[in-house]
Image: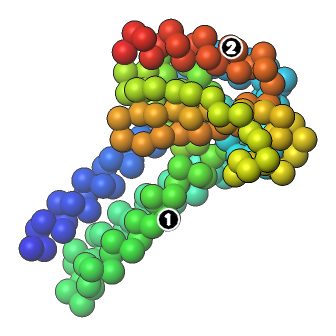
Amino acid sequence: MKLIFEFLFLSIVIYYSYHYIILITKMKKKTALIPFDKIDLKTVRKFPQKSADAPVISKNKLGLTMYAVMLFFLIATFIFGKYNMKFSWTYLYLLFIPLINAKDLLNVFAVFGDGFISGSKFVPWKKVKSFHFKKIVLNHKYYGYSQEVNEGYELILKTKMTSHSLVVTEEEMKERLASIFEEHVKKG
C-alpha cells in the first residue's frame, strides 16, 4: 500500500514539475501573438480585478518562485517521509491543496503559435476542444468589478480535462481572439 502512495505522489509531483518547466520555456523563448503590446495587456484579464501581466519571467517572478517553492516543499516532504518511519502518508496529500490551486498564481494570458498560457498552465492547440464568448451582464459573476469588465465578455476555453476563462474588455480583442481560436480549433 505504501508503494502505491509513493508512486501516486511521485506521479503528481512529476506532472506539476513538467508543466512548470514547459511554462518557463514558453515564457523564455517565445514571442506572444497576443498580448502584442501594453494596450493588449489592458484588454485581456485573467482575473477581472486587474489587467494581465506580460508573459515574461521578469514580470512573474513572485508567482513562479512560489510555484517552485511548493514543488520543492513537496519533494522535501517526500524525502523526509521516506526516511522517517513516524511520518504518516495520509497527511501528505493535504499538501496538494495549494498545488491544485497553483493555476491562480500567475496573472497571465498569452497566445502563441503552438498554444496558449492561462495562469500557470500552457495548453497546446491540440487539447482545445471548444471556445465561446459570454457577454458580461447584470447577473454574471464578473459583473461589478469595473466599468470595462461590465461592458466586456468572458472567454471560456474548454480543453480535454478542464476549462479556462478570462475577461476580454474590448470588441476588437474579442474579434482577434475569435479568429485565432477558430483557426486552431478547426485544425485540431
Task: Name the residue: 71% across, 34% down.
Answer: 135
- The answer to whether marks 1 and 2 mark residues whose Cβ atoms lie closer than 8 Å is no
Q: Is residue 25 visible?
A: no
Which is more foreground, mark 1 or mark 2?
A: 2
**Of helix, strand and loop, which one carries label 2?**
helix
Query: Which residue in the structure is indicated by mark 2?
Result: 176
Q: Which mark is residue 4?
A: none
Residue at 90% from the left image edge and 41% from the top image edge: 147
- Count residues near mark 2 (Cα–Cα under 10 Å), then give few for <14, some for 14-19, many for 20+: few
**As displayed, is residue 167 above or below residue 104?**
above
Q: Amino acid at mark 2?
A: Arg
Reading the image, the residue beneath label 1 is 98
| Amino acid type of the residue that numbered disc 1 sits on in the rendered structure | Pro
Q: Answer with left or right where residue 77 lies relative to residue 98.
A: left
Which residue is rendered at x = 17% and y = 60% of the image? 7
Q: Quadrant of residue 175?
A: top right
